[in-house]
Amino acid sequence: MTVKEKKHSLYSESENGKKVNNAIDYIRSSSIFSNERYKWISPLIVNVLEDNLDEDDIKSLVDSHLEKKTKRSKISRTRLDRAREKIESQVQNQKSPIRKITSIDNILNVGLLNLNEPIKLKDGLNVFYGKNGAGKSSIYLGLCKTLGKDKKVYSNISAEDKISTCKITVEDSAGELQELEWNSSVENAESKAMIFDSSISNFIVDEDQINQFRMVHLKMEYFSFLYGLYQKVESVIDAELSKNKDELNTTKELLLEKVAFIFDEDLSEDEIKRASFTEKERQKLRESENLMKVLEKNNPESTLRNIKNALEKIESVLSLFGEPDEADEGNEPTLKLYFTKSYFTEVNKRMVNYNNIKKAFEGGGKNKIASLIPPDWINKETWKNFISNSVDFLSSLDKGEFTKYLNDICAYCHQPLQTKQAKKLIKAYQELHEEYKEKLDKEALNLKEDSDLISGCIEKIENIPDINQKVEIEFANIGKEGKIKFDFDELKKILQSYKNLIDKFEKIEVIESDIKQIKTFWNIYNDLSAEFKNQIDRLNKAILDKIKAIDKVREKSGPLYRKQALYTNKSSILKYLRLQKHKEILDTKTSDLSALRQATSSLKTSFVEEAALKEFKKHLQNEYQKLSFTPPETWSIKLSTREGVNRRVYNIGDRKLADIFSEGERKLHALSDFFTQCELDEYQGVFIFDDPVNSLDEENIEIVAGRILELIKNSSQVIVFTHNLYFLNSIINTQKEKITKVERIHNQINLVKEVVIGETQELRDRLKKIDSKMSTLSKKEPVKINEYDIRNVYDLMSGYLEDYVEKVYFKNVISRYRPNIRMLTLGDLKDLDTSIIGDVLTLYERTSRRGARHSQPPEVKKPKYEELVNDVKELKNKFPVK
């Protein structure tokens, strides 16, 4: 049989009409697990498909394929039928533990609802009826939260305690009773119960649905068994990998210390095993080592380091007193002395230039301001600094401020300039400043740099004796004797005298003996530098010769060292190679498992596409027929897997159902999808519907009611919440069957349990409520009676009159929301008394105006207690229930 034929055989049915084929046939027909690459795991896969394996079986088989010296255990092979029976028993035990809800024991602080008296629920159909806003949703939401469903619940905003609670009693599949409790501070685990409401309906139409239903007969559990197998095998391999990694790292660290070269070479295991080291080779290596010891005894490297340190000290002196000179190409630049006769000649030129600019500045100033200040001020240095600083300050201001202080206000006293002479003085100094100040500052800066250079040299001279001591220690290493002799104090005096002249801006008279003294100092250290450098060159050559000799010996002994290292560390190297090979095998098996997961996932997906989707579509079409719904011909269902989640996608052409379907069609599709999932799960248990027929017309309401009643025939419990009287009349016989009626009176939800909608008992119950509330009001002083307590009674009276007209006056012939007029009881209206119509209308208008059921115009007066007493008396006298 071909693979394609095997796939088609999955959908065959046995004589009793139940499907017996399953995923194991589909898996066996696949070529994935016969692939040579996965041969090592094939025995495990075969046995998983036939029976569960224990951990020892898996560990033993995995070890045997990892080339470990572990005895391979025999894996028992059992018949396929045994595995199938095992799966069937597991599936049977997976049914919902909740068979029915026996009672709703209490619901507290859910919306306006506070239910303290239990509501008993029947095995079959249970109906909660009430108008919109009556409080049905509070009961529904309390049930949902207790069953662990994801719903939003809000407490009464007027209540101090914000915790909502609910408690129900359920019966499990074994007939045992158990209590389920919920409060809003925690979330319950989800119980298996099927719920349907408007939000679920919209979600089914608007969103792509996750395929989370189980199709028992397809035995998709086998795929989970395979995934479980991969997980178990992977855990064994991961543990082995972790152990292998630790050993491998430890061994590698050891080898890096002793034979690091092996990691740069491609050595085989055979080469390592053949490694040897003879006694003759050992003798040759000893001879080479002895020769290297002799060569290494001479230690010029240490002497070289000391000489270099001394040279650094010498050059630190030279670098302060000199600057690099131009050098020939290929040679290092040498230093030349700063303080030569030509250097001081240049300094004098800058000095002359500075004094000329200063003289021009002062001469121009006298001409411009002689008549504006006292004659003896202009030559005073204090006055010059004062006026110069003021000009600098003015220049730092913005344009507007600068003009103000230049022309109108004194920058020092902040008072207006009183005379033209004062303004002229400020302006004259500003012009002089702009003309000469920048030039003066530039020359002054150059002279200051000269002065600072000499200061640095004087400071360095203080340290030269200490430097000399460290340099003189190394004289023996360059073949020199004696000490450095020089009058450093005289040198300091010479330099200090030149610095003083520069600081005073006075011309330097260069003395030949001074220049000679400076040159003598410079030559001492320049010559020392040359001697130390020559010795460094000689030592470098000696070291290079020694290195060459050692390298020559080492080159000859290198192969011997390599052979000795390989031989000595043979066992560690072989261990490392085995561990590395073992790691490669483990990595390959991990890669195989990853590939198998992907292959199994693809196989499962194709199986779902071939079987699950086809099965779902068939059931969905069946549900469409049951609900008399015909979808567009172009609609389609496809599967899409995103982020590991498989969903079914509905389309009509290139659009979603939500874009095409009307409100009624959306509802019928959502119900069909819901019932299809339940059918595929073969679910029997609790169904809860909250207003399932919104947006449906009368004909479809009757059809949906019939489909819901089918659930009861399959031994399921059905709980329905509705405000639709037409649906209510379609799902029960309102003349005979009892329901729970939910009413809201102002800020309180009331439940009328075990009531028959079609009889006058409801009217009697209303009268009892009216009497009870009137009795409570009669015990209060009229001024202390709340307005809304009065309106609540009027609401009861208004509702009573509506039911009275329907049930008593019209004898239930014409009834709200009933499918048909009761023609056989039409004769009961022969003696209809029309005289009471006026009284009914008058009283109904008063109760409606004074109640809270309908919106009221602003001018309506507040109801009064004494009016209520009279209206209740009129109601009971004129419209009693017999």
Image (cartoon, rainbow, N blue to C red):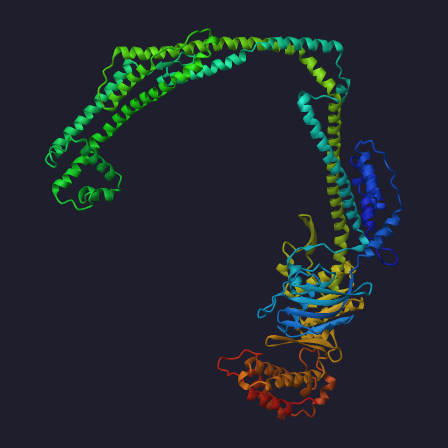
How far from the left and from the top, in percent, is residue 786?
A: 55, 81
Q: Residue at x 17, y 26 (%)?
A: 359
Can the viewer see residue 864?
no
Q: Quadrant of residue 753?
A: bottom right
> Residue, x 68% and y 8% (percent of image)?
287
Res 189 seen here: yes
In this picture, residue 761 sits left or right of residue 780: right
**Left or right placement of residue 769 versus residue 353 in this view:** right
Q: Quadrant of residue 620?
A: bottom right
Nearest to the observer: residue 186 or residue 329: 186
Q: Position of residue 124 (x, y in %)?
A: 78, 70
Q: Residue at x 68, y 87 (%)?
A: 808
The part of the image, by quadrant, that contains residue 235 is top right
Residue 201: x percent and y percent? 66, 63
Q: Nearer the viewer, residue 506 or 459?
A: 459
**Residue 690, percent from left and from top:** 68, 68
* Residue drawn at 67 percent across, 91 percent down: 832
Count the labels in the image: 0
> Quadrant where the N terminus lies?
top right
Q: Work out whether 388 lies above or below 777.
A: above
Residue 723 is left or right of residue 611, and the answer is left
Viewer-nearest residue: 84 or 419: 419
Instruction: Identify whether 157 is placed above or below 321.
Output: below
Position of 675 relative to 764 (above/below): above
**Quadrant placement of the C terminus:** bottom right
